[in-house]
Image: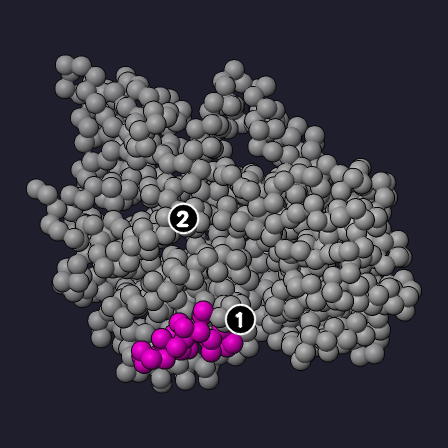
Amino acid sequence: MSVTRLLLAATVMLCCTLAACDRSSQGSQGSQGKESISEGGTATQALHDGELMAFSVEAGVSASLAKDRAERISRLSYELQFSVPGDRTRPLAGRAILRFNLAGNDSPLAIDFAQGADSVLSVSSSGAPVAYDFDKEHLIIPTAALREGDNVLTLDFIAPQDAVNRNPDYLFTLFVPDRARTVFPLFDQPDLKARYSLTLEVPKSWTALGNGRLAGVEERNGRRMFRFRETRAIPSYLFAFVAGEFEVVSQSVRGREMTLLHRETDGEKLARNLDSIFETHADALDWLEEYTAIDYPFDKFAFALIPDFPYGGMEHVGAIAYRASSLLLEESPSENQLLNRAQLIAHETAHMWFGNLVTMRWFNDVWTKEVFANFMADKVVNPQFPDTDHALNFLVSHYPQAYGVDRSEGANPIRQQLDNLNLAGQMYGPIIYHKAPIMMRQLELLLGKTAFRDGLRTYLTRFSYGNATWPALIEILDEKTPIDLGSWSEVWVNTPGMPDFALRKAGVEESSWLLEQTDPRGEDREWPQQFSVLSLRGASETDMLAARSAPLPESVQGAPQADLLLNANGLGYGRFPVSDALFDAWQSLTPLQRGVLLVSAYEDLLARREKDALAYFGRLVEIVTTESNELLIELAASQLYHVYFSLLTEEERDARSTDLEDKLWKTLASQDSPSKAKLFFEIYSAVALSSSALEQVRLLWSGEESIATLSLQEAEKIRLAEILAVRLPDQAEAIIAAQREETQNPDRLRRFDYLAPALSPDVDTRDAFFNALKEPANRATEVWVSDALRRLHDPTRLEHSARYVLPSLELLEEIQVTGDIFFPSAWLNRTLGTHSTTEVAGIVRDFLEDRPDYNPQLRMKILQAADPLFRASHRKSKPPAQ
């Protein structure tokens, strides 16, 4: 369809269907405004005194533009109206009415809209058409169309349905960090919080969810109109709506009214999960109200479970979005899966206070909302799981991922510089989600829990419905301690990396120890922190404060180094020396101490090339097959997978595969717990390579054989079909066809059909699929892309998939522009995560060396994702020095 026809269709739809003031007159004004732009730039000429020529903007939302607008604009509100066609090929038509107070009118005003100039149908100010200009993703409003004081701008526009994540029979918005401007014109920055009202017209069979309370639903001309009341002040990235063919479930839990939207077709799965989902949200709300001393700060609480949502969840006010599979768990979930669900719910609920009530001023502080959501989530789930070792859960949830970045050449600080919001997606990653909570726990230790909580209450009260910075919080907390928190924060928050710890002889005594902290970057930094030291000989654990150099506590000074477990309570952060002899005392250690030993030993293995990977692999096999704690089993299994496929040579792996499979199968068969049986089957199927092991997986997948304690649901069978199709290429066609026939859920079937070419044994089919990913439209559902890349780069296909590495790196800049915030890292991790050869490592090194001016943030992302590859290839490049 031509642009002219699209504009005409959208204008007619807008005028005929959307609730607005005097449609005919607004349409006329819009037409005049559009003609003035299209006829040779006459609108630009109309701007008096050439002011537009002197007014410049850049693509995105620059820090300088945001600062200027924040100083000029106040009392901002949006009245938004969208018409969603049933036909996916037609654009959305919309109207945005912006009301705001302007403090000064000495320069034009830029409104963000990341579509083409032809997508703007009209602009009027207080009913009069505006001769505007369109430049670099901005509508430029001249001073003649504005006034100091109150202003009302009305903008009619169209936007592609891809901008609102359109699926065949549903859609959802996801505007963090700066994607709202891809759908409608606005001031898209976090410190211009506004009130939003929404009118949404959709196909008749659809329902809808918005931020505000539902004001009414009207059916007209075979369509449905949803009107949502005005919200409290929220930032633009939290404005959201979901619409489509969803089932609606409402519950009242302890007086709290909550609504859930879902598309799940498995009634038994729903019945198993729904009550727990509602209860867990209510528990989180109760806890957070008590901790913050602030009642839930918004008008409604609802959430939508969306198939293959790009994130685990997103904290939209009144309309939280979750990936459906994160909350609707399969039968017999593991302890870790239950904990992950509770933590995800607590995380998104905590955002209602941390991020939504008080919002960062600029996205360089996006980590503040994430660290508090994660930190509070860990606190919230404790009373919900009284039998869980929460210190161990904190350790396994945060430390491996934080270390994975901080050990790399691409380590980034928690707080980063940000010049333009179009780069804000690069702020996200394991450091803000996993290192920051570790830092925050150390800060709480410094202050004490009560002083820390009281400081947060002051912070939330002082900045309610407004914006704040990290230094503003540090200033509040600094009043509660004699410690210089500014200097403490400078190292922990503003610089990357972690310390190396080493034990040194304190004097002539053979076992008199100093613990020394060194800066691997040679910058003489010091990370003040508290943790404990365990002496096996005396079975004593004692706390210490780690400075640049500090003697070990007196109670452990007499112990030989092999008997010392540093950071025994899991509170410290850094690379700690560890003795392999500690594994001989495994049974005498607490679960937390075992976790600390695993984490420290794994970091030591990766850091020291001379460490024996085969010996460590043997320890992991023993731990996985004998340990009873599910959190430890999963931690050890994740390490085992990497060591097995990346650190061992092919010959070493082949020599041990049958023994590994046999031990895992025997362990699986001996389980009387359904959750553990499922856990061990997942481990077994992930490492299965031999024809006999793969045949055993196939028999269980097909239902030809069964294990009494093992029940496989549809999503799990799809995962198995993917593994089997890749690793049993001669049977791939039959496996894919059988799984298609068995899959009942239409959303899961669409996903499986998308992945099918990536599962194919035919290399030309796989190559064609990968090449198709170069088109943004074929990357629209990013979770599917990530899953497909995982299958393309299966450990059994690496010789062929190495050809995808360079073009994947070459696509990264485009992916950063077109993708959501986590997609660049997911793209890199799936591409590089299983490779271990010097050839692929050389491709990455050459790519970066050939591009000295490459985007620094993306360079960091590549170096982070490539760290396991670099270490594995270096280990394999030549025999370790003796």
Q: Residues within 10 Å of mark 2 (few under 14, many from 20)?
A: few
Residue toward you, 35 or 665: 35
Q: Is residue 328 left or right of residue 843?
A: right
Q: Amino acid at mark 2?
A: Asp
Q: Is residue 424 left or right of residue 126?
A: left
Which residue is painted at 72% across and 44% down in the image?
Answer: 193
Indicate the quadrant containing the C terminus: top left, top right, bottom left or bottom right: top left
Residue range of the region highlighted in magenta in the rendering: 749-774
Mark toward the start of the polypeptide (1 vs 2): 1
Which SS class for mark 2?
loop
Which residue is label 2 attached to?
Answer: 853
Which SS class for mark 1?
helix
The image quarter in which residue 528 lies: top left
- Determine if residue 302 is in view: no
Q: Residues within 10 Å of mark 1 (few under 14, many from 20)?
A: few
Q: Is residue 5 left or right of residue 347?
A: right
**Which SS type dominates the magenta stretch?**
helix
- Determine if residue 653 is in view: yes
